[in-house]
Each structure stands twice: as C-alpha cells, then as structure tokens.
Amino acid sequence: MTFPILYDPGNRAAAEYGLRFDFPDDLIEVYSGFGLDLPKHHGEGTWQLPMPARYVIDGDGKVRYAVVHADYTKRSEPEETLAALKAL
C-alpha cells in the first residue's frame, strides 16, 4: 500500500479518539454464557472492542472522510472509502 494504515493493539488509539467500547458487566455475562472469551481471544485480558471507523486524512492532516458506527455489526462500504481516497 502506498498510504499508512493504523494498527492499534490494545485499542489505545481507539480510546484516545473515543472509539473504544468497554463491555458492561451484564453483557460480559451474556457473552461468557455463550462460551465466548474475548480477553483470551484478543490476548490482552480486556473486554473491549474498537468501534468500526474509517477516516481518510489528507497530507495536511485534514479529515476528508469519516464514518463511525457505534453498532459493531454496521460497516461502511469499501467503495465509499475508495471513492474518498480517489478524491484526494
């Protein structure tokens, strides 16, 4: 790729931008009841996920495209992001 992509182990950047979802205790109980162990799966010991977000930032640091979904099951279409990149 000819542009940088953020890799965020531990969701530190997500937390800084308010994009980290911390599971409430009742939801942890539900997921655990299904046999899901998110902390073990991620290898970080936390019940956290980043919210799906895409940003296209130009060379001057200006955000040209931003999509954030609080519902992790909703994602923007890749074509939208590609169009934003091509518009630069």
Image (cartoon, helix red, strand yellow):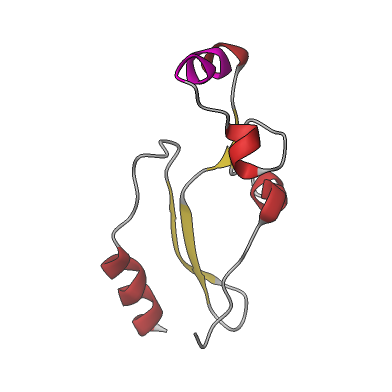
Question: Can residue 21 be spotted in the picture?
Answer: no
Q: Is residue 76 magenta?
A: no
**Of residues 58 and 9, the one drawn nearer to the viewer in this rendering:** 9
Question: Which of the 4 quarters of the picture holds residue 84?
Answer: bottom left
Q: Quadrant of residue 60?
A: bottom right
Report the label total: 0
Principal secondary structure, stretch drawn in magenta:
helix
Does residue 32 show up? yes
* Side (left or right) of 10 relative to 48: right
| Residues in magenta, as a range | 28-34
Residue at 54 percent of width and 18 percent of height: 32
As displayed, is residue 39 above or below residue 34?
Answer: below
User: In the rendered image of this protein, does residue 64 appear above or below residue 34?
Assistant: below
Residue at the spot 31% in from the left edge and 65% down from the top edge: 78
- Residue 76 in picture, x, y percent from top left: 33, 55
- From the viewer's perspective, is 53 left or right of 47? left
77 lies left or right of 49? left
Residue 58 image point, x, y percent = 54, 79
Location of residue 65 with respect to 72 vertically, above or below: below
> Residue at point 61% right, 66% down?
6
Quadrant where the C terminus is found in the figure: bottom left
The picture places residue 62, in percent across and down from the top left corner, at: 57, 72
In-front residue for pair 39/62: 39
User: At x 58% / y 33%, what residue is drawn?
Assistant: 38
